[in-house]
Image (spheres, rainbow, N blue to C red):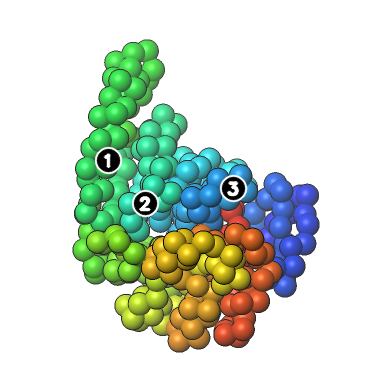
Amino acid sequence: MNRVVLVCLITITGLAGDRVHATTPAIQANPLTRTQIVLLGTGTPNADPDRSGPAVAIVVDGTSYLVDCGPGVVRRAAAAFRAGVKGLDAPNLKRVFITHLHSDHTVGLPDLIFTPWVLGRNVPLEVYGPPGVTAMTDHLLKAYQQDIDIRINGLEPANTEGYKVNAHEITPGIVYRDERVTVRAFPVKHGSWPQAFGYRFETPDRTIVISGDAVPSPGLIEQAKGCDVLIHEVYSQAGFQTRPPEWQRYHANFHTSSAELAAIAAQTRPGLLILYHQLIWSSTEEELLKEIRQGYDGKVVSGHDLEVY
């Protein structure tokens, strides 16, 4: 399984056995791999300065496809571009697939609309997501109307297309296809949300499934069977036990425990299981991985921002 090679200010994490971590990563891409997975944000609503909000980039032959746009998404993409992932230059951020409309997954949407435009994107942003995403983008454009007017009608040589948004409210099935990738949306259960989605990406050399926020469901298991990479949210069972009862009820109905994820992985057998959106609380990543490995013997890593697989 292709992993990032990081150099400069390196420290061994010990979390994945053979992975290294770096304060300032320099990414050395595998020239034999057409598809890169870049973890732009692995965080939760918690304001952890080391973890930006949920966002994953699938980069195929230098073209980027984002999943979710949590806070910090554009600057994380800029950091990955600076480190060698050419498809994540700001003007290349042209499409995003949103799993659901929780704020931690969408607070970066205005950033994704406007910053790449200011930096040269000259085509509308394509946004795919559940019902409600059109209203969200419409309201954002209205909220920033003065900014748009000044940039277009003032002295700034801004183009008149790059701030626009084409919003696509999706249903389960194939929602996007081009010569590099086929993207399939599938429904997942996320507490009270009437509609939430996971995504399955099929590229020339890899099949990647991203859970979004979800509890276990037969549909998710079916989509993930035999995939090359499963990127799945998770919470620590040990940390969960320390939470107040009302929060335990919430998390049990909105998210996947380490034991539940181990069972999902044992059924689907992905080539690599990547944990993201990790709710750890008073526990540790080491304990979280131990909990997973109690029920699953395959390859598993706890993801961090700016790792590339």
Give the amino acid at mark 1: Thr
Q: Which mark is residue 137?
A: 1
Give the residue pinned by disc 3: 48
Front position in the image: 63 or 96: 96
On screen, residue 275 versus residue 222, left or right, reads: right
Give the total of numbered labels: 3
Residue in the image at 43% along x and 33% along y: 115
* Position in image of residue 268 (x %, y %): 45, 83
Residue in the image at 40% along x and 71% along y: 215
* Position in image of residue 135 (x %, y %): 22, 43
- SS for dot 1: helix
Label 3 crowding class (10 Å Cα cut-off): few <14, some 14-19, many 20+?
A: few
- Taking 225 as reference, is 90 above or below it? above
Give the amino acid at mark 2: His
Q: Estimate the spatial distance between the alpha carbons at disc 2 and disc 1, rounded to whole Å.
A: 14 Å
Q: Which mark is residue 222?
A: none
- SS for dot 2: loop
Q: Estimate the spatial distance between the alpha carbons at disc 2 and disc 3, rounded to whole Å.
A: 17 Å
